[in-house]
Amino acid sequence: MRYAWAGLALALLAACGPAQVNERRIANADSEPGNWMTHGRTYSEDRYSPLDAINTENVSELGLAWSYELREPRGAEATPIVVDGVMYVTSAWSIVYALDAASGRELWVYDPEVPHERGASACCDVVNRGVAVWNGRVYFGTIDGRLIALDARTGRRVWEEVTVDQSRPYTITGAPRAARGLIFIGNGGAEFGVRGYVSAYDAASGRLRWRFYTTPNPREIDDAASDSVRDRALATWNPDVGAWLESGGGGTAWDAIVFDPETDTLWIGVGNGAPWNREIRSPSIEGRNNDNLFLSSVVGVDPDTGEYKCHYQETPGETWDYTGTQPIILSTLTIGGAERRVLLHAPKNGFFYVIDRSNCGLISAGSIATQTWASGVDMATGRPIENAEARFVSRTAIVLPSPFGAHNWHPMSMSRQTGLVYIPVQEMAQDYTSDPAFVYRPGRWNTATVHAPLPEDRATRAAIRNSMQGFLLAWDPVNQREAWRVRLEAPWNGGTLATAGGLVFQGTLDGHFRAYNARTGERLWDYDNQAATMGGPVSYAIDGQQYVAALASYGTLFYLPAGFGIPNPPTEPQRGRVNVFRLGGTAQLPPRELVRLPVERPPTIRANAATLQRGAAVYTQFCMACHGFGAISGGVLPDLRRSASLQDAGVWAQTVHGARAANGMPDFTQWVSDGDAEAMRAYVAQEAMTLYAEQ
């Protein structure tokens, strides 16, 4: 069923009328603090709620008001949208839900029926970060690249447009934005080999109005808004040699797209290169600029036409997967005695940027996490002061931040009371080595880097795990300095919400949902949300009652490759939920259903050291991104050490070669031989034997 609804619930919703959100309402969102009408609540996307009924004095009385179980248990990263008493939220596989925001009663559900084999093109789980609501319709993107408009009252589809070439591994995970009668949407898939762009569609008809490509076309003009800067961008790439000529160069805009009514600009956060490794993507030519515009940049365009206005490139010649797609906050700050309209950005590379919204000029940059790739930013040029060895051209480099970033997609917030920005920060290192045998493989991971497998020694693994740190950081953007920092139990923690009650809310990887004093960082409230709480929390009010909402699920990127770094991997049936809180709430989540996951004795596979090394290399290249470093799953996708197919060489080979493609397991026939599949089975069996001995 594409949609379903409850008759009584629809009748109640119809009595209120559909969600008539427009640009005027969003621009005046502070006059409606009980609603959360767009991704960051206002067009500034500062994720600050003016509601203060829940505050530092009474937050300890916060309890569960209601909980709704999502239909898919995979990663749930959405920011709920709440308009006139109705909550709109998305979950894994791009399913959309409309719920009564006071009770959690289901109003309707729309399943776009994404083919599950499309999951093989999703780098970071089949997630979706939410919807846009505009003039009685709900808009969302799907993991297979469609943009869909639904009737907000009934959940019926109004129109649907395919926004990508579906023969290529594009995905959409980000939330669309709405302004000027247009719906703005980007896409993802750089690691798999695509060319990024942002599109604007007519909200009423679904007609494409403009498109801006974030990497240049080396062969011809595109008849797109970006044509005016094609030559400027092309002058920063190798025009004759490099994997980018086949891959498209990456630069996908998969998250941050922010409308700025004050400067009449649409701000786009642009992603990493494809492949990551610049010297394979776009080999350097002596005397020629090789910055690869507009990778890892913030780009401003005209919201009505898509015409280029300005840009600031945060990581020139990006080579570490340092995306610039992280959330953007628009603000006005007093700097040097003058008011400045600024853009605040904390991308993966570990710097916090304050950028002038009038011309993209850099005002200041501060370091929010340990970095080894650069020692600072040269304010005369606006360029990073790089450590040349970090580029791993001729040797392995251990680099901070890792591809997970110092800050990733998890939303940051800014308090209008404290003037501080609250950022989920993490510190993890990564080894990078240029891949001498790189071959572009369409539709598969194409980073042109190799990374060492986890060491066999358990003590060394524990040391690596303990070195991975997560923090909640309160940052002063005017003075570019830390106000306070809270060490968390794990990296990869959730987005933040600041409120007029003097609070900051944040979820954690290991299942907590917490409230802190916004001025001091003191923890004031802690709730067991029973699953990773990654998305942006929101606050809204109905009939004078303030609520705080957050999604909880096992899933998201960290639960795929980095299972060994999770403090308490899930050992219970997986669920995804919307959990909503209010003062005096007395609802209860069902008890945890802890289970013991047995390990069958692994098969004994005769393999010499060279075969095991080859198996580890093949596993790392093709399987690690989904099934975990060292075959240690985070619990979302199967732990191959426990897989029944490990016992049977034939079944294992069939799985590697496409037997489960309909379930989202890629077909590696073109790239993994029978011999390599068996070497990989030997490697996983070795890891399984260690687990078996430890149980």
Image (cartoon, rainbow, N blue to C red):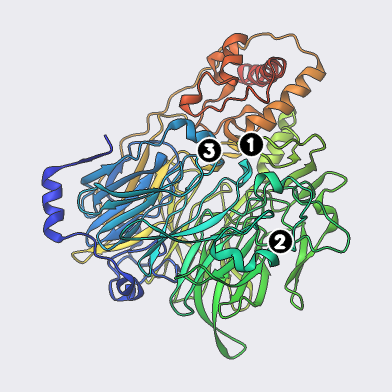
Horizontal and vertical percent position of residue 311: 62, 70
Number of residue marks? 3
Mark toward the start of the polypeptide (3 vs 2): 3
Badge 1 local density, few (<14 within 10 Å), some, or many (20+)? some
Amino acid carrying label 1: it is Pro
Q: Is residue 165 above or below residue 455?
A: below
Camera-nearest residue between 524 and 496: 496
The residue under label 2 is: 234
Vertical relation: 503 (above or below) 622: below
Q: What SS does tag 1 mark?
A: loop
Q: Are marks 3 and 2 in contact (CB under 8 Å)?
A: no
3D distance between C-alphas at marks 2 and 1 = 23 Å
From the image, tell me which residue sits under label 1: 442
Label for residue 167? 3
Relative image position of residue 107 (x, y in whole percent): 20, 47
Q: CA distance from mark 3 to mark 2?
A: 25 Å
Say which amino acid is labelled 2: Leu
Give the number of the mark in front: 3 or 1. 3
SS state under label 2: helix
Between discs 2 and 1, the one toward the N terminus: 2
* Image quarter hosting the N terminus: top left
Is 160 situated left or right of 564 in this image?
left
| Residue at point 72%, 15% (across, down) | 675
Residue ID at (83%, 55%): 284
Measured as percent of width and height from the top left, residue 580 is found at 31, 52
Quadrant housing the C terminus: top right
